[in-house]
Amino acid sequence: MKKKIIVGNWKMSPATPEEAKSIFLKIKRSASRVRGVSVVICPSDVHLMALAKLSSKGNVRVGVQNVFWEDKGSFTGQISPAQAWNAGARYALVGHSEKRKLGETSADAAKKLFAVIRDGMTGIICVGEDTRDKDGNFFALLKDQLLASLAHISRHMLLHSTIVAYEPVWEIGRSDLQAMKSRDVHETAIFIRKVINDAFGPDIARALPILYGGSVSPENAHSIVYEGGVDGLLVGRQSLEPQAFSVIIKSMHPRHARK
Ligand code: 13P
């Protein structure tokens, strides 16, 4: 069975290094008691090095939330993939909807994804529709976004260093009761695998990890993964709550008892 993958996206929180370290250490402690789950925390860049140091001798890895596609040069405010790697990041989120909202295109995301994988990290490429229409036109948009974002990626890169995170934009930041139904997650995961199958072949479609993100909570994590047929979760707010996040990690056990 494939390992489940739980990624925490801390976005622009917390405000101090002390808080970041304290939350991280609590997560590390609970993750050390769980088998069969890869845990990744993507803090903001200012906390990256400190948390990467804490991550040695444990099973929680650290990732970066964004990088630029160039490896060096005069690009004020940007972080290169090599800098992220040297700071300890082993994963990189690419094309998150909150970056896309600020103007990042799939063409930009494609260059970033290539650069992070070239420099040794696993790229987590985020895709997702803004809204859903009854006629299912969002599927075409999702397909375009996915294929455009993977434009520079080889089969080898896809097979070994790429994760797709499906995050419907309209599902981010809601209450867990409003989170996407498992059957809709399932339908979309099948669609994503079909797009990958048609473009890259069945071996890659089978192997590629797909995560779901958007209002994940301890209450819905298990069913989204096991009924939704995805390989893990990309978690926002609840990844800053060590207790809740620990339940989400534990709930990746196939026989996790639901309340
Ligand atoms: P929430 O889990 O807070 O809805 O955020 C989802 C997200 O954007 C993770 O990248």
Image (cartoon, rainbow, N blue to C red):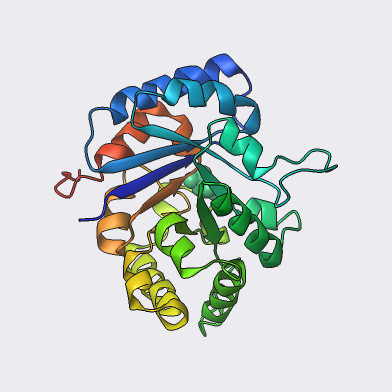
Look at the image and tell me whether residue 199 can be seen. Answer: yes
Q: Is residue 197 above or below residue 4?
A: below
Q: Residue 123: where, in percent of width, then height?
A: 52, 52
Which quadrant of the figure has residue 76? top right
Look at the image and tell me whether residue 11 can be seen. Answer: no
Left or right relative to 12: residue 168: left
Q: Is residue 108 above or below residue 196?
A: above
Which quadrant of the figure has residue 106? bottom right
65 and 142: which one is in front? 65
Q: Report the quarter where the C terminus lies.
A: top left
36 and 218: which one is in front? 36
Q: Residue 8: where, in percent of width, then height?
A: 46, 40
Residue at image coords 45%, 57%: 163
Q: Residue 37: where, in percent of width, then height?
A: 28, 42
In this view, which residue lies farthest toward the top? 18
Left or right relative to 180: residue 154: right
Left or right relative to 251: residue 102: right
Q: Report the quarter where the N terminus lies.
A: bottom left
Residue at image coords 43%, 29%: 241
Residue at image coords 41%, 57%: 160
